[in-house]
Amino acid sequence: KRQVTTVQSSSVTVSPGQSGYRVAYCPTGYLATGGGHVIASYTSIAQRALISVYTARPIGTNGYGVGVVNGSNSGLTFNTYVYCLNSN
């Protein structure tokens, strides 16, 4: 029976003016079918407008990577997630 599961990366804090990158990987026996990111902390909508995603793409057959640039004057925290389908 096919089963989909979601895996999240660990969170990373990105300082003002810096970039950060995270990859989430599927467990053994699962294939990545897509993914995304969650920006978990920002102080305002104005700050959110200054945060850019510079890459969001599959990594091999079992991962998904996302990179962000923090153009704001406050730190932010984000993580990446991947949707995984078992290959059995």
Image: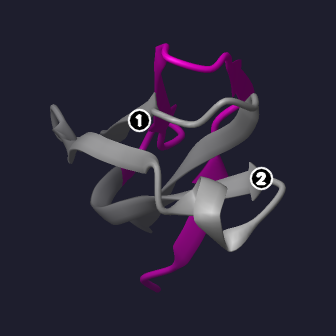
Q: Is residue 48 left or right of residue 74?
A: left
Q: Picture coordinates of residue 32 (x, y %)? A: 31, 55
- Image point 47% across, 47% down: which residue? 51
Magenta segment boundaries in residue numbering: 1-30
Q: Badge 1 is on which residue?
A: 68
Above or below for 39 versus 75:
below
Q: Position of residue 84 (x, y in %)?
A: 43, 62
Q: Quadrant of residue 74?
A: top right
Residue 3 falls left or right of residue 54 = right
Looking at the rendered structure, the kind of residue marked 2 is: Tyr
Asked whether the viewer can see residue 9, the reply is: yes
Which residue is more in the foreground, 16 or 67?
A: 16
Residue 88 visible (yes or no):
no
Where, quadrant-wise, is the C terminus in this rendering? bottom left
Q: Secondary structure at mark 1?
A: strand
Circle 2 sits on which residue? 42
Residue 17 is one of the magenta-drawn residues: yes
